[in-house]
Image: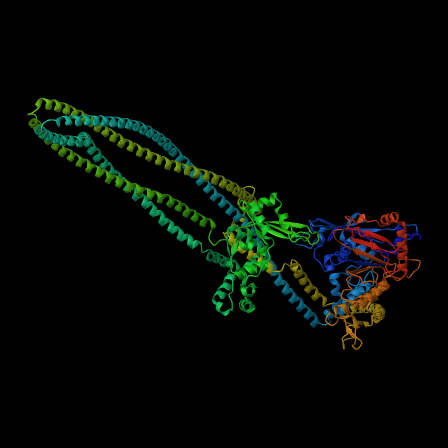
Amino acid sequence: MSPPHRLTEEEQLEEYKAGSIRRVRLKNFLTYSDVEFFPGPRLNVVVGPNGTGKSTILCAICLGLGGQPPLLGRADDARQFIMHEKELAEIEIELAPHKPESPNAAHQKHIIRRIIDRNKGSERGRGAGASTYFINGSSVPLKKVQQLVHEEYQIAIDNLCTFLPQDRVGSFSGFNPQMLLQETEKSLSGSQHLFKTHMELVELENELRTSGSSVETIGDKLKHLQAENDRLEREKELMEERAEYEKKLDLLQKKKVWLQFDEARIRAVEIKEEKDSLKMEEKQVRVALRPLEEKEAKLTSDVSRMKGRFAALDKTLRQSQKEYEKCLRKAENYTDEMETSMSDLHALDSIQRQAERRVTTQKEKVESLEAQMGDYPPENEIEDMINEARNSATDCRKKVQLTKIELGRVAQQLKEREQEEQASRAKLTKMNDDRARRKERIFRQHPKLYETYSWLDQNRKMFRRPVWGPIACEITTKSVNTAAYLEQHVPNSFLKAYVVECKEDYNLLYREVREKRRLPINVVLVENGKLSNISRMYSDRKLRVLKQDHGVMGYLDESFSAPDAIVEALRNTASIHCVLVGSEKTQESIDRHKLIDYLSEREDGKPGLMNSCIFSCHLDRSYKYTSQVSRYSGKANMRVDDITPAKMLAPGVDPEQKANLESAIQELQEEIGILRPQVDEAKCQYDDALSKGQAVTQRLKDARAAKNDLNVFKNRLIVAKRKLAELEESASKDNVAEKESILRKLKSQVKNNIDQLEIAASSHNDMMKITYTSAGVKMTEDGLSERKRRVTENLADKRAEHSALEERMAQVTRQFNEAKRQMRDLKTKADSVAPMKDADGNELPLKAQLEELPETLDEVEATIEEAVAKINSIQHNPSVLRLYEERKREIEETRREMEGLSEAQNAKRTHMDSLRIPWENSLINVVNKVNVLFGQYMAELGNAGEVTLENGVVDGDSEQWANFKDWGVQIKVRFREKSSLQVLTAQVQSGGERSVSTIMYLMALQELMVSPFRCVDEINQGLDERNERLVFKRIVTNSTKPPTDQLDKRSHCGQYFLITPKLLPNLTDMENENVTILFIFNGPYNFKHFSDWNTDKFLADRKRSSPDSVEEEEEEEEEALNQGIAGVKEEPQDLPEPDISTNQRTNKRKSRRISD
C-alpha cells in the first residue's frame, strides 16, 4: 500500500480562508508553559478533560487578536492570564493571508504577537498598559492590531454570534430580541453596515423625538438638562468634598509618619535610660565587689591564724596533762609509803595505838581536807575568774543591746518592704483586669460598636441563649506576641463581630440593631455554642518533632482563652486550628533547615504538597509564613508578612508599666527574701547573746560561791591541823623516839604527797586555763569561718549579679542600636514624605498644618480610617466636572437650537427615510433566510422553530415613528408536539433546549457571516445523547461544505472551533476529511516540550521495528475508514501521554502533535 500524499505548505495555504488561524503559540499563558498547535482550515473540535486548558485556547485567540478580558467574561485584567510565578506571558497567532493577486506573487502573512508583562500597567487598573503588540516582529499600537483584525480580515471577536466563550454561553440565550438583532447585524458584514445603519436610525429617531417641534418640547428638554445639570452639580460638590478628604488623608498619613518617628524616638530614649541605669548599677556592683573580696581575704588570714593558735594550745594542753598524770602517780606512791608508816605505828601499845589512831584519824581528816583543798583552784585564779566573769557580763550586756538594736532595724525594714509589696500587688491586680481596660480602649476607638454593645448589655434577657461579643473583648491571649499573631490572622471586621448560638437570636439581634437602630453589626451563628470535633493539620508524631526540634509551641487556637462559641467561630472563619505558633528557634529552622518545605509535606500518602501557615519571631520582630499550593503547577508559593503590634487585642494596660510594676514587685520580693534571713539571723544573734550573758552571770555567781567555800575550807583545815598537833603531842609521851622517827618519816611522806598533789592541782589548773583558752580560740575560729562562708556566698551572689547585669547591658545595647536604626529610618522616611523645613532651614507651612491634627497615633489612625471610609463612600468620578461643563454648554446649544429646529428636523427625517428602506429590505431578506434554515434544522431534531423580525411599531403611532430601538429578532421554538411555539427565554426552556436552539440559530447564520472563523465553547453541555449526535452532525455538515467555487478552495464558510470536554463514541461524522481533532491532556507523563513529538519519526521507528505489523495496521485503518470509524490507533503503552495532539486524515489529512 503506497503512503498517502502529503500536502505542501502552499497547498495547505490554499484551503485557509483569509483571516483563519493557521498557528497558535502560547508561553506562560494560564496553564500552558510553552505550546504550539496548528488548527485545520475548517472544523476544529477541541477535546479534553475538564481543567486541562480547552477554554484557555479561546482566551488566547481573543487576547492575541487585540481583544480585552471583559469580552471573555472571565477576568478584568489581562495580567491575570499570566501563569502563576511567571512575569511574562506571550501569545503568537499566525493568520492565513489573502490570496495573492498574481499566481507568482508570495503570500503576505501576518503574525500577531502580544506580550503581557505582570510588572507593567497600573496596579489598580485593568492592565491596559501591561501589553505590547507586534505584527510580523515590529512593535505596533493596539489600534493597528485592531485595524488589521477588524478591517482587513473582518474578524469579529466582540460578537457573540461568531465568538461565544464558555463564560458567555448563558448570555446568548438571555438576549432580548433587540440585543439579538444587534449581534446578528454585527456578524453579517465586516464593516457592520447593517448594524451601523440601525444605530444611525435609532439615533436619528431619538434626535427627532427629543428635539420636538414646539417650544414646549424644547422647554421640557431644557428642564431635563437643567435637572441633570443640578444632579451633576451635587456630584461636583461631592467630588470637591472627596478632594478635601483626600487632602486631609494625605496630611494624616504624613502626620502618622512623624508620630511613628516620635514613638520610635521615645522608645530609643527609654532604652537609653535603661542602658544608662544598668551601666550605673553595674558600676555600683563592681565597686561593691572590691570590699567583699578584701574582707574575704582578711577572714581567710584570720581563720588560718586561729587554727595555728589552736594547734599550739592543744600541744601545751597535752604536755600539762602528762605532767598532771606524773604528779598523781608520785602522790599515789607517797600514799603507799604513808600506809606503810602507819602500819609501823600499829605495833605500839594499845594506848599508843589509840593515840596514834586518833592522830591518824585526825591526820586523815587533815589530809582529806588538804586533798579537798587541792581540788580548789588558787585564790588568785578565783579572783581572776571573778574579774573575767564580771568583764564578760559587761560585754554581754553591750552585745545584747547592740543585737537588739540591729534586730529592730532589720525588722522595721522587712515590715516596710512587705507593706510596699502589698500596695504594689494591689495595683497590679487592678492592672490585671485586662479585659475591662481593653474593652474601654476598643469602645473609645469605635463608638458605634459601643452603642451596639450597650444596647445588647441592657437587653440580654430578650435572647434565648448567651450572646458573645465583640469577639475582641472575649479573647484573652497568653502573650503580646500571640495577640499580634491572632489580630494579623483574623480579619479586623470579624474581631468586631458578635456570636450567637441559635437562629432566632441571630434574626432578633440583626433586626433590632441593624434594621431598627441603623447601627453596623456583624453577627456569626454557632449552633448551641459548642466546639465541634476538628482534624489537625499534623499528626501527633510530627507535632512532637516540630516542638522538640523546631521550637513550635502549638496551634494558634491554643494560644488564647475564650468561650467555646468564640473559638468555634474563629476556627470556622479563620481556620486558626490549622495555624502553628513558633518561637525564635522556629525562625532559625525556617532560615536554615527548610521548615516550610517540611510543613508542606503530606502525611496521608497522597501526591503533591499541602498548604501551611506558621508564625515565628526573631529578637523583637515577628513574621507570618503562608505557603499556598498552586492548583495549576502544584508548586508551593510562600508569602512572608511582617507582624505589627496588636491594637485591638493588645493588653488594656501599657505592657511596659505592667512589666515595671512586676519587676518592682520581684525586686521587693527579693529584698524581703534577703531581709527575712537577716531578721532570723539577728534574732538568733540576740537570743545567743542573751543566753551567753546569762551563762556569764552564772559563772560570776559560781566563782563568788567558790571563793566563799575556799575561805570556809581554809578555816576548817587550820582547826584540823591544830587538833592534829595536840594529838601528836599527846601521843608522843610513850615511844617518843620511835614514834618521832615514824612521825617524821610519815610527815615527810605526807609533805611529799601534798607537794605532789599541789603540783598536780597546779597542772590541773593550767589544763583548765588552756582548755578555756582553746575553747575560746576554737569558737573564734568557727565564728570567723562562718563569717567567711557568708562573705564568700555574698561575693558569689554579687559576681552572679554582675554577670547578669553585663548580659542585660549587652541585650539592651542591641535593642538600643536597633531602636536607633528604626528611628533613623523613620526620620528619613518622614523627611522624605513630609519635610518640615526647606533647603534653607526655614519651616514649611506643613508643620503648622500637622500641628492642627490629633497628637496620638491611635487618634490619627482612627481619623485615617474615618477619612478613608468617607472617601470610599463618595464614588470617584473625575469626569463629573467635565460632564458638568458639557451639560452647561449643551443647555446653551439647546437654547440656540430653537431657532433652526424645524429645518434640521425635516433634514433628519428625510435622511432617516433614505436609510430605512434599503436597511429594512436587507434585514427582511436575511431574517427570511435564517428562518428557513432554522426551521429546517429544528425539524431535523424533531422540534419546531421560527425566526421573525419584530419591527417595534406601536399601534396608532406607525405613521410618525418606526421605533427602531425596539426592532429585534425573536426566536420561537417548540420541543413538544402538543405545545405551541414559545419565545426562547431562560425562564421557559431548559438549559439543553436553550443550547440546541442557540447552536441551530448560529448554524443558520453561518453562511451569511463574513468572519473567517467562529468559536463556540461547550455549547453541547446539557444535551441528551440523541440531540448531541444530531447537533454534532449539523455542525460538521455546515462547517465542512465544499467550496462554492471549485477553482477557489477558500470559497467555503470558514474556520470553526468547537470546544467540548467529551465526544460521544462512534460519531458518524468524525471521518470527514475537513474535521480536525485537537486533543488536550495533562499529567505527569507528558512530553517535556511539545517539539519532542514527531509523527514522521514515530512512524519510521515503528516501520523499522516491525514493517509487517505497520502494514497490517495501515490495512486495518483503511478498512476502518471505509466502514466510517475514526482511524485512530491506540498508542503503545510505554509512550508518554501528550498535552495537545492534532490529527488530520492524510493524503488531505495531516497529523500533528504538540506537547506542553
Q: Position of residue 467 (x, y in %)?
A: 51, 65
Q: Which residue does the image show at 47% across and 44% down from the upper left?
A: 270
Query: Which residue is at the front of the view, 788 or 224?
Result: 788
Image quadrant where residue 733 sits: top left
Judging depth in this view, the residue of 770 and 1146 nearest the camera is 770
Quadrant of residue 223 in the image? bottom right
Please indicate, yes or no, whether residue 758 appears anywhere in the rendered image. Answer: no
Q: Considering depth in this image, is 386 or 743 the residue closer to the camera? A: 743
Q: Residue at x 93, y 52 (%)?
A: 2
In the rendered image of this protein, does residue 663 appear above or below residue 458? above
Q: Where is residue 1128 in the image (x, y as percent from the top left)?
A: 85, 56
Q: Which residue is drawn at 13% across and 24% down?
A: 742
- Up/down of 369 relative to 64, above or below: above
Nearer to us in this view, 368 or 817:
368
Compared with 823, 6 (above or below) is below
Is 220 placed left or right of 548 in the picture? right
Instruction: Describe residue 865's horizontal placement relative to residue 1049 as left or right.
Output: left
Rendered position, 497 above or below 316: below
Q: Where is residue 4 in the image (x, y as percent from the top left)?
A: 91, 53
Number of callouts in the render? 0
Say which quarter of the image contains residue 931. bottom right
Visual colour scheme: rainbow
Q: In this view, does 931 lie to the left or right of 74?
A: right
Horizontal and vertical percent for residue 1079? 80, 56
Task: Answer whether residue 1076 is visible to the viewer in this image.
Answer: yes
